[in-house]
Image (spheres, grey):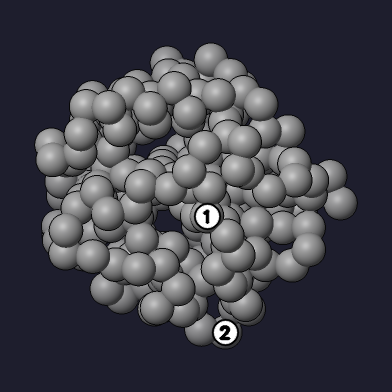
Amino acid sequence: MNDSVPNPLHGAVFWRAAVALDHLPPDEGTEVAFAGRSNAGKSSALNTLVGHRGLARVSKTPGRTQELLFFQLDERRRLVDLPGYGYAATSAARRRDWGQVIPAYFEQRQSLRGLLLFMDIRHPLQVGDRQLIATANALAVPVQPVLTKSDKLGRGAAKAALLKVQRDLAVFDAVLEPLLLSNLSGAGAVQVRARVAAWLAEGD
């Protein structure tokens, strides 16, 4: 990991949680959302990117995040941790609720600049991932795919997985080329942070 590059996401702090659209904070400034399957390492990735291991709660029980969690960088810039999906123990009612809330959030939230989609490099583009990408693409929300746990594969296998995901996503207009991220070593964090920082700077 290149520690000589300043971390533009340093200093993020938990701000508030929302369980429904009418609980969201004012739609001002800029924000970037984080999404992913419940076992994709999303919370660990958020901690890696902000440089604070304890910011987002990492649980051994998938599906723990059941709210929209807002982390504030300053008065104008935020990170939003969306509920994990794809966990079988989540109730059908809860899955239905979030299946309605998340698309509505994408459509209505004017301060949203982009979506980081975290996927386990060994199991990318599951049904929920594809549904989320299609929804975001239809609403013109830019998506940055991030393949987590890249340290679980050798360099050649990781590159092959990256290229396959890139080809599979070529049909979508608003999806950027995927990036690799290791929460263990921090490899790839500089590139992912740069994408988030660029989105957050839009409108300044």
User: Would you call the spot at circle 2 few (<14 residues within 10 Å), some (14-19), or many (20 or more)?
Assistant: few
In depth, the one of 35 and 104 nearer the eye is 104
The residue sitting at 50% across, 24% down in the picture is 103
For residue 9, which quarter of the picture? bottom right
Left or right of 189 in this view: 4: right
Classify mark 1: residues with Cα within 10 Å, few (<14), some (14-19) or many (20+).
Answer: some
User: How many numbered marks are there?
Assistant: 2
Q: Quadrant of residue 22?
A: top right
Q: Which tag, 2 or 1, sits closer to the chain's start?
A: 2
Q: Tell me the kind of residue under disc 2.
A: Ser
* Residue 7 image offset from top left, x and y in percent: 60, 75
Q: Which residue is mark 2?
A: 4
Nearest to viewer (mark 2 / mark 1): 1
Residue beneath disc 1: 17
Q: Secondary structure at mark 2?
A: loop
Query: In this orientation, does residue 61 appear?
Result: yes
Residue 56 is left or right of residue 190, and the answer is left
Q: In this orientation, which residue lies closer to the viewer: 23 or 160?
A: 23
Name the amino acid, label 1.
Ala
Direction bottom: furthest residue: 4
x, y percentage for residue 48? 41, 71
Can you give x and y, in whole percent of width and height, for residue 170 in the image? 42, 22
Q: Identify the residue at image location x=38%, y=27%.
A: 97
Q: Is residue 173 above or below residue 52?
A: above
Q: Would you say 4 lies left or right of 42 here? A: right
In this rendered view, identify the residue nearer to me: 17 or 54: 17
Q: Is residue 34 visible?
A: no
